[in-house]
Amino acid sequence: TETSRRQSASTLDAILLDPYLLNGAAQVDGSAQLAAIAQGAVAGGGADQTTADALVSALGSVLVANVSRATAVQYEATNVAAIATADSLAHALVVGALPGEQVREALDPAVNVSASRDFAASMVNSTRAAPGGFGSVALPLSTFDGQDVAAVDGGVDVLMYLFKRDVRTDKPAQEVLQTDLLGVTLASASGAAALVIKGLPAPIVLAIPFAANP
């Protein structure tokens, strides 16, 4: 239930509060439990703000834990679960939403997640802010050309997550990023399936700020 998910997320947030106490096994187990809660929210009616905030706070603690205490296998497993948590939470944030409603976000210094639902016609030729305002996504006029009308007629979900850690690698030594890692999914609001967008005459442009080297 929503209440049990909220309680579980808050409990994990408290348990994982101090990242310096998390060894490799704790990082794997904690991130896997967070992913399970987020996935349950998608199937169980969505996530309220308290649940969402607790999930990203707990995930943030895992992501800044000492990677030297984790093996390569544990590091990779944590990264996989982190992506699953962020992706599922983004989906959960728009369960039951109507097109045009306010963007929902859950923010932490280590990971940000946002989700919104809008009509396809309102989204083209527009720029959407990345979660927390760190970057943006510019959608050209042709974004949904070639899409099945039934897939976008009920609206399109813009699902985004931004990580400060490179969750796409299994090598801790390569975790330092020059920019944040931004993931964007455009999904059908009616079916929740990601839209396959390719061959556009104009590109979808991601803008991600980064600090210049001194």
Image (cartoon, rainbow, N blue to C red):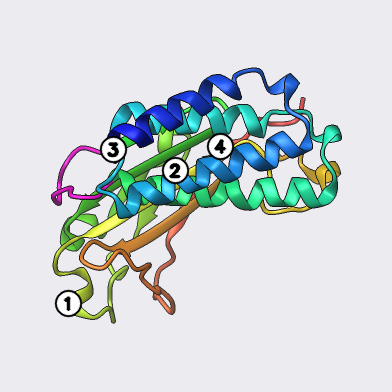
Label 3, on which residue? 2
- Residue plotted at (36% across, 31% down): 6
178 or 32, which is in the foreground?
Answer: 32
- Whole-angstrom CA distance, mark 2 to mark 1, is 30 Å
Label 1, on which residue? 150
Element type where label 2 sits in the image: helix
Instruction: Please state the extent of the stretch shown in magenta in the rendering.
Output: 94-103
Label 4, on which residue? 209
Q: Is residue 59 above or below residue 185?
A: above
Please tell me whether residue 203 belongs to the stretch shown in magenta. Answer: no
Q: Are marks 2 and 1 in contact (CB under 8 Å)?
A: no
Q: Nearer the viewer, mark 1 or mark 3?
A: 3
Q: Earlier in the sequence, mark 4 or mark 2?
A: 2
Element type where label 4 sits in the image: loop
Element type where label 3 sits in the image: helix
Element type where label 1 sits in the image: helix
- Decide whether the magenta segment is chiefly helix, strand or loop: loop
- Whole-angstrom CA distance, mark 1 to mark 3, is 30 Å
Q: Is residue 133 above or below residue 155?
A: above
Q: Nearer the viewer, mark 2 or mark 1?
A: 2
Q: Amino acid at mark 1?
A: Ala
Label 2, on which residue? 37
199 or 103, which is in the foreground?
Answer: 103
Q: Earlier in the sequence, mark 4 or mark 1?
A: 1
The answer to which image quadrant residue 50 occupies is top left
Q: Amino acid at mark 3?
A: Glu
x, y percent for residue 179 = 64, 40
